[in-house]
Amino acid sequence: MRVFVAGATGAIGSPLIAQLLEKGHHVIALTRSLEKAQTLAQQGVEPAIADVFDADAVQAAISRAQPDVVIEQLTSLPKTYTNESMQAAAALNDRIRREGGANVLKASLAAGVRRYLMQSIGFWAVPGAGLADEETPLALDASPAVADGTRTVNELEHRLLTTPNIEGIVLRYGFFYGPGTWYAPDGDVAQQVRQQQFPIIGNGEGVWSWIHIEDAAAATVAAVDRGNSGIYLIADDRPLEVRVWLSAYAQWLNTLPPPHVSVEQALRISGADAVYYGTQMRGVSNAKAKRELNFQARPLEWMVNAAVARIS
């Protein structure tokens, strides 16, 4: 199939393109950079040069490509994971997803694309007992930044899933780890953990769902071929409380255990969003993806040999 990828140069872009090519798909990738276009061409990808905010240019690029499937992976996230950097990046990230995504979707419809996959977020389910699934509402009343994010995600998902004449598939990914991510050994979070700047908040009961970027790419490729319209949660088999995964992560990095801070301290120092992530986050179930996409995820890298009984 002819597969058009918007957002091919992000963390998931490289493994996604490699796996699409390996499966024999003809890949066309959107970029506004001539330098990146040359790199893509060297990888066996057909580059399409356009600014995602230029609706006419995007429509012309997708019309020329005549893809069977479009994969939208548009984001603009910082290399550092701090409150300050995330807030600074929020406006552009929101714009690229709303406005850029709207341009790609409109152009896809005009070109007669039959299937459209969109990146979404799999760790913003409303807090509660047990694992969330695809029917669980998003946390629209969470901490300020999370609530803003969930409202945006809710709108973008609704936009795609209610668009007629196209098969819309939403892929809600867990937290990315692996090469090029914040959680890689050379990533920003790893550096914060080494510097004792990423604490366990309160009892550390927030539950995080993870996905290696290679596994996220594999699930996306599977959805290209056999996904059904609707939402899929793409995460590994074992959501983990912060107190468990963060302690094991520090151990894996061969550094000191993370410090503990109270909820009150965290509210004062890091704000309500950090408390939400540290104490209220809800894990998700990947049962639907396993059932319909034959999805399989590797165990979280730093948990494989962790002394879980000692750190739980």
Image (cartoon, rainbow, N blue to C red):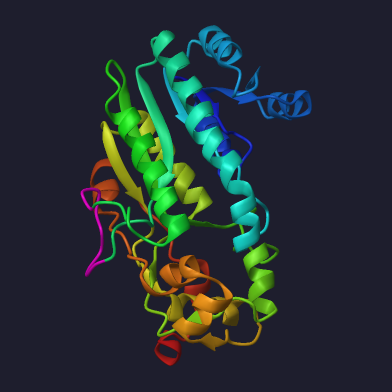
Compared to residue 136, the image places residue 301 above or below, namely below
Residue shown at 58% from the left, 57% from the top = 178
- Can residue 306 be seen here? The reply is no
Which of these two is toward me, 245 or 96? 96
Position of 54 compared to 236: left or right? right
Query: Where does the image place residue 22, in percent across and percent down from the top left?
Result: 53, 33
Compared to residue 201, the image places residue 209 above or below, namely above
The magenta region covers: 128-136
Query: Where does the image place residue 167, in percent across and percent down from the top left?
Result: 30, 24
Please identify the quarter of the rendering in which residue 250 is found. bottom right
Give the farthest residue toward the bottom: 310
- Is residue 267 rendered magenta in the image? no
Q: How many marks?
A: 0
- Is residue 134 rendered magenta in the image? yes
Magenta portion: prevailing SS class: loop
Please identify the quarter of the rendering in which residue 33 is found. top right
User: What is the quadrant of the C terminus in the image?
Assistant: bottom left
Query: Where does the image place residue 71, in percent across and percent down from the top left?
Result: 46, 29
Position of 48 compared to 63: left or right? right
Residue shown at 36% from the left, 60% from the top = 142
Compared to residue 299, the image places residue 295 above or below, namely above
Residue shown at 55% from the left, 44% from the top = 12
Residue shown at 56% from the left, 72% from the top = 270
Query: Where does the image place residue 175, in percent across and percent down from the top left?
Result: 47, 57
Position of 120 compared to 18: left or right? left
User: What is the quadrant of the N terminus in the image?
Assistant: top left
